[in-house]
Image: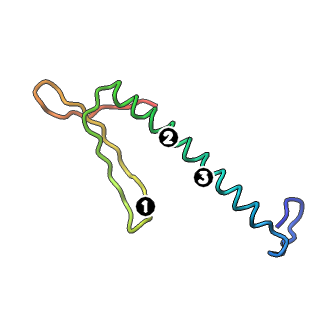
C-alpha cells in the first residue's frame, strides 16, 4: 500500500534493490546501537562490582525471550548476594 491511500502497490513497482539497501543500513545501525548498549551495561556491572550474571531464557529453538536477569556480587564470606540495578 502506498502512504497516501489504501491502494495496493503492485510488486512490479516495488524497488527491491532500494529496500535491500535500507535493510542493510538499518542492520548496521542496530549493530552499532547494540554495541553501545552492551558497553554501557558492562560499565554499570563493573561499577557495582558484579561477579556473576545469570539469565533465564524461555523459548524453543531460535525463538524466545530472556525472562529474568540476576546480578550477583561476592561478599567477604564468599557468598553471592543479589544486587539491585537501577535504570
**Which quadrant of the figure has residue 19?**
bottom right
Q: How is the image coloured?
A: rainbow
**Which residue is at a point 66% across and 57% down the rendered structure image?**
23
Q: Secondary structure at mark 3?
A: helix
- Which residue in the structure is indicated by mark 1? 64
* Circle 1 residues within 10 Å: few <14, some 14–19, many ≥20: few
First in residue order: circle 2 vs circle 1: 2
- Which residue in the structure is indicated by mark 3? 27
Determine whether label 1 and label 3 are within 8 Å by CB.
no
**Which residue is at a point 61% across and 45% down the rendered structure image?**
29
Give how far apart the Cα atoms at labels 1 and 3 are: 20 Å
Q: Nearer the viewer, mark 1 or mark 3?
A: 3
First in residue order: circle 1 vs circle 3: 3
Q: Position of residue 87 (x, y in %)?
A: 46, 31
Residue 35, numbered label: 2
Where is 66 relative to 33, above or below? below
Give how far apart the Cα atoms at labels 2 and 1 are: 21 Å
Extreme residue in the left direction? 77
Residue 44, numbered label: none
Horizontal side of 60 relative to 52 (left or right) equals right
Q: Position of residue 51 (x, y in %)?
A: 25, 34
Where is 17 relative to 49, above or below? below
**Which quadrant of the figure has residue 20?**
bottom right
Q: Position of residue 59 (x, y in %)?
A: 38, 63
* Circle 2 residues within 10 Å: few <14, some 14–19, many ≥20: few
Q: Position of residue 8 (x, y in %)?
A: 84, 72
Amino acid at each position: 500500500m502506498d502512504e497516501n491511500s489504501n491502494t495496493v502497490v503492485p510488486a512490479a513497482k516495488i524497488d527491491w534493490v532500494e529496500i535491500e539497501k535500507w535493510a542493510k543500513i538499518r542492520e548496521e545501525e542496530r549493530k552499532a546501537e547494540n554495541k553501545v548498549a552492551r558497553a554501557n551495561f558492562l560499565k554499570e556491572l563493573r561499577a557495582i562490582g558484579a561477579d556473576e550474571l545469570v539469565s533465564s531464557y524461555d523459548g524453543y529453538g531460535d525463538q524466545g525471550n530472556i525472562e529474568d536477569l540476576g546480578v550477583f556480587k561476592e561478599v567477604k564470606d564468599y557468598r553471592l548476594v543479589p544486587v539491585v540495578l537501577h535504570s
